[in-house]
Image (tube, rainbow, N blue to C red):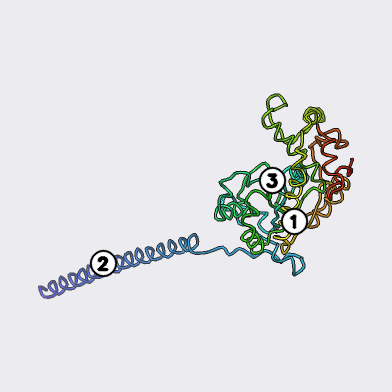
Amino acid sequence: MADDHSSFTKDVLLVKGLKNTTLVWRLVVLAFAMVCGVYICSICLKQISTGTKIGFLDINVVQQPCPEPNIEPWEIPYVHYPNPKTYSREECSCHPVRYFTILSMQRSGSGWFETFLNSHPNISSNGEIFSVKVRRSNMTTITETLDTIYNLDWFSSASKNECTAAVGLKWMLNQGLVQHHEQIAEYFRIHGVSVIFLFRRNLLRRMISVLANEYDKNAKILNGTHKSHVHSPKEAEILAKYKPTLNSTLLIASLKQVNDTTTKALEYFKSTRHIMLYYEDVVKNRTKLTDVLEFLKVPQMDLKSRQVKIHKGSLSSQVENWDDVSKALTGTQYESFLHEDYRR
């Protein structure tokens, strides 16, 4: 009986031992599973984090190139896609831009002509940029200025909200242009800049306008304000009252000097793509403006200007010493200037 009791006790203890051992193993397996779960989760989180970083940092957006413009092969050097430093062209980035320069002389109608161009929503002509001497002090400053203009980083009243199709400036022959003509012509060639020549046929009329404008710079007839151009007939009438006195002795030499300067400019830039205009022709026939728009390859439209012509009528009514002027030019190659007239 005692042996049976002892045997039963041993069996009970053996069963309890097995149960305790099973519980321990279960706890071990559970702990191992938890550790593995935490490890696997940490690996997944790292992968997700890495994937996120790659998605935002390493993927580059490749911009599609602009479609090829429908142009003739010879036009390719004159079509540009500027990338301004000061702003983004965004939706205009694939709109081609032509570069131009108006080469002219003071009092030859360039300001009036430029207002026509700037009435076009896709043309920006930035005025007489090189009237400021420091900008034309040497070829380096000239190049920097031109680069800024043609890269669409030059801001003026000519800047447009619409996509620019043609950008340029007006440049007087006595503003470093002739002095650095070789380097400038090369710049025009490399950068595909087209030239618009604008001169006056009647150099005598130009001389009268120059002298009258110089007088008003000091006299300031219009309420103490100097105006090279006006927008009302009344202001034009007031300015036209002044009649300059011309030096009849130096008259022919002065006209010849202006003519020679013009001839040299035409020779210096003859290899540059250009169009030739005369102020008188534009006054008589506004279809000349259509030719300019075609030259610049911009949409055709009716161009307008608010400027009012100052000196009208016959030359004899605009010069104080007309008899001396007439006598000096009669029988010379400039005699036709005494009689040529144009009205509109």
Q: Which disc is residue 23 wearing?
A: 2
Which badge, 3 or 1, comes first in the chain's sequence?
Answer: 3
Q: Is residue 158 above or below residue 57?
A: above
**Residue at horizontal 74 percent and vertical 34 percent from the top:** 212
Instruction: Give the class, few, some or many, for how many residues have Cα within 10 Å of label 2's Cα (few <14, many ≥20).
Output: few
Q: Are marks 3 and 1 in contact (CB under 8 Å)?
A: no
- The image shows residue 25 at horizontal and vertical percentages of 26, 70
**What amino acid type is highlighted by mark number 3?**
Asn
Q: Secondary structure at mark 1?
A: helix
Q: Which disc is residue 161 wearing?
A: 3
Query: From the viewer's perspective, is 155 left or right of 216?
Result: left
Indicate the quadrant where residue 329 lies: top right
Which badge, 3 or 2, comes first in the chain's sequence?
Answer: 2
- The image shows residue 266 at horizontal and vertical percentages of 74, 58
Q: Which disc is residue 263 wearing?
A: 1
- The image shows residue 263 at horizontal and vertical percentages of 75, 56
- Position of the C terminus, as image quadrant, is top right
Label 2 to label 1: alpha-carbon separation: 111 Å
Label 3 to label 1: alpha-carbon separation: 38 Å
- The image shows residue 78 at horizontal and vertical percentages of 70, 62
Q: Secondary structure at mark 2?
A: helix
Q: Secondary structure at mark 3?
A: loop
- Position of the N terminus, as image quadrant, is bottom left
Instruction: Give the class, few, some or many, for how many residues have Cα within 10 Å of label 3's Cα (few <14, many ≥20).
Output: few
**Residue at horizontal 89 percent and vertical 43 percent from the top:** 339
Q: Residue furthest left?
A: 2
**Residue at horizontal 66 percent and vertical 49 percent from the top:** 174
Q: Closer to us: mark 3 or mark 1?
A: 1
**What amino acid type is highlighted by mark number 1?**
Thr
Task: Name the one closer to the observer, 200 or 250.
Answer: 250
